[in-house]
Image: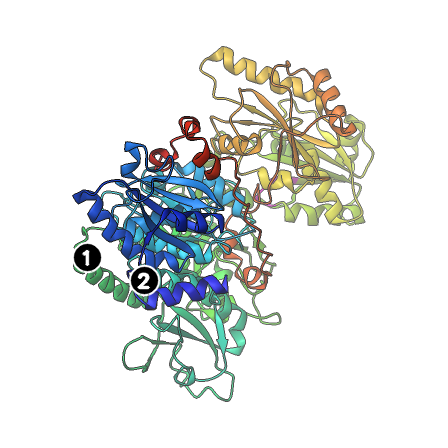
Amino acid sequence: MWIRLGVFLLGMWAGGGTAAHIEYTPAEFYEKLHSGRMMFIYFEQQASTAVSLFLLELEKSAGALRDYAVLVGKVSCKTEPVPSYCSEERHQRTAFLFRGGREFLSFDLDTVFDVNSIVSEVLFAILREEVKYVHTDTDLLAMERSARGKTDIVLGYVRSLGTQDHRSLMETAYVYSSKHQFILITGGPVLKQLAADDSSVSSRVWFLHCRAHGGSPASERCPSTRMRWSLSALKLHSFLQLMEAPLVSEVYVDPASVPPPQFPHQLTPQVFLFSRPETELLDLASASALAWRLRGLALLLLVHSESPAVKTSDEYNAAYRLPEKSSEVKYLTLHSLDDVLGLLTDRQDEEEEEEEDEEEKEEGLDSERLDDEVAADVFEKRASQPDTDSITQLTSGNFHAEIARSSLTVALFYLKWDAVSMEFLSSFIDVAERLADSEVNDVQMSAVDCGEWTDLCGAQPGTPVPFRPIATFPSVLLLRPQQPAQRYRGMLGGEALHRFIMMSRTASPLLLSTQEEVTSFLQEAPPPELAGYRPDRILGLFRTRTETGSSVFAEAAKSLRGEVLSGLLSGEPAAKWAAEHAVHLPAVLLFPSWRTHTRPSALPVSSSVKELLTHISTALIHPVPELTVENLPSFLSLGKALLLLFVGEEDDEFGRRQSQALVEELRGVRTERYLTCWIHLGRTPAGMSVLGSYLGSMPPLPALVLTHLPTGDEIYQYPPSTPIVASSVLRWLQKVEDGTESPAGKLGDDSWPPAFQFYDFLKVMDMQEPDSTEQEAPTDDEEVDVEEHLVAEQLTDHHPDIGPKFHSEL
């Protein structure tokens, strides 16, 4: 790669090559052909204006392609005809590329009309195995999945092939294709997926960070950074070098003592954030979050102010240096790091507008497109920040007083410059307004801006706050006076949070003493705000409230608060309940929400809270549960393989009954080894892409697959033509266990992991760079033997006309 890079840079500084002598005799052509050199040759039969113009461009391209070990030449057919190439009239409009002594490709002169098109098309042909072309967003998603954990992707858009932009992209791919996967698009659905309009977008490049983000789910894309400069080989080289720069650099001297960036980052601004010893971890997390938003715009450095070499006044918490003639560092006191982002993006906007004016590009492009859908949505809503009047702002000064005022305080810890935080803040405010409208007065909704109140969010153990330092954003804690904080671990959505809060208002466990209270606990309808929702319930039966098992159950019930309603019954009433349900004290009775009758399941009381929670979670699962985005993490945490039935959206009542019958049939397949479940593609559309990724294409529905085996990544498909009957499925599972069933696919590392892996900044920084994978060598089965071509002229009729059709799909 370094040899290629040296040639590349020398060629760029030299201006892309100079004109060279390109005329060869047939004898010289044969000599160089047998040497195995890569050659781009035109066989001139007769002169014409169009051919003369092409030959001028061909001569210019000789110097440029020489840098890439490609010999460019013209062979005159007038002196000594070359068989096949000088005898057919159609070859007057064709140039040929030879590799390894054979004809490799042919090009119509309409596609290689000037030096840019010649260089770009020839390099595109050479790199045909390294540079992929994608037509649809599905194709791009498949490439991202394949690249996860292995290599990053450079995605280039050019309006048309054969242009200067296409050439720049191919010249860069020649150097970096062994390090990154290059993808080329010319518009269409992929450009729309990237939130760009191909009617106004100039050529662009996106860097897809796939190598360090193999833990994202199949439905998530690799996070991307757009190159904000106009496309040229040198700028693209600088951009790729910038993508390899550390996300955050740590320094222990004043910003003024830090030297300006050196080549190739000499035109890149520097942003400095100051770190204090008491908030070091939070400062690093904040710097990493901002660095992702500045990726491609600036280099971020974290200054450790505790160093004796740092003399900057404590009144400043940030600084920056712009790549102007003066290397002066300017210091700032910020309440929001959005100010720095705005400063740099405004500067970048001005540069982009100047470039577009110079190149007479169409205007109206949103140059502030951010790196992911959440960030883009937040950016578009930046002018209308959510109204926070309905929630209480917690600070270091009022924290303890506000917590003491209410029996339950729900606190959101967020960062203003974090896209997910700001998106969730809107949902959080909606929940607060919903509670106020329902006249729920015992819950106080509050928020903490951790960018401003770092001492509160980063409070170390031993300080008088009931929680550990906040390390992930956004985080929601439920705070009660004189009690430890409870963390909300549900989905970051308004509906899930609202349901959790409403269920958390009930004591856990609820202390019961009479038969009537138990009946009310088990049969009480949910409040109007949760109409239609059936919560799971558990009831602990104990001889006394002081026995060991009772305390274990009480701790488990506290952990389940907000998710499961729990009650505790002791003494004589508990003995009667145990006798009626034929269980021995102590016992835990479970009333799952999916069960219509009132007969409970019984569990013995475990000796540890963790063990009891595991038993409760397992027992509350439906025999054949419906898999959704919300419950998937809890299912995977069981560590069992998934026997997963995919059913489509039914058109009528008959279809619904048929799907339900299949689910009921799978009750007979329930085993300890597998979790038998099903997914309704109408209610959970994401399942369609999951099923397609499992098997490579969409099979007929219903489809039954076995996946997530603890022993391997294989995926097995139940024979589509075989009726789904419990006995047949059990026999098929036995064949899988015996090793006599062939897998239908393989589960990649990118399947079903936690969402938004790229927000785990410390993990990203600690990741080791994986070994680069070798590119597959191009096959020779599409090449034409030139010697056979020369000796047996009649065989030419059997050769495919590769030239005009090679890029026809583009």
Residue 282 position, x and y percent, is 51, 68
Front residue (pair 408, 762)? 762
Specify start and end residues of the magenta stretch as a single range.
561-566
Q: Earlier in the sequence, mark 1 or mark 2?
A: 2
Residue at 70% x, 28% y: name it: 600
Give the secondary structure at mark 2: loop
Neighbours of disc 1 within 10 Å: few (<14), some (14-19), many (20+): few
Residue 189 position, x and y percent, is 34, 37
Give the secondary structure at mark 1: loop
Residue 564 position, x and y percent, is 61, 40
Amino acid on which disc 1 is placed: Glu
Indicate which label's residue lies in the foreground, 1 or 2: 2
- The Cα atoms of the two marked residues, 1 and 2, are separated by 23 Å
Q: Quadrant of residue 107?
A: top left
Q: Which mark is residue 359?
A: 1
Judge whether residue 539 can be spotted in this image. yes
Please, which colouring scheme is shown? Answer: rainbow
Above or below, 564 against 329 in this view is above
Q: Is residue 563 magenta?
A: yes
Residue at 49% x, 48% y: name it: 34
Q: Is residue 388 magenta?
A: no
Residue at 52% x, 52% y: name it: 151
Neighbours of disc 2 within 10 Å: few (<14), some (14-19), many (20+): some
Q: Does residue 316 appear left or right of residue 275 in this picture?
A: left
Front residue (pair 374, 248)? 248
Q: Looking at this view, name the residue that lies furthest to the top.
A: 654
Residue 730 position, x and y percent, is 73, 21
Front residue (pair 405, 86)? 86
Amino acid on which disc 2 is placed: Gly
Residue beneath disc 2: 17
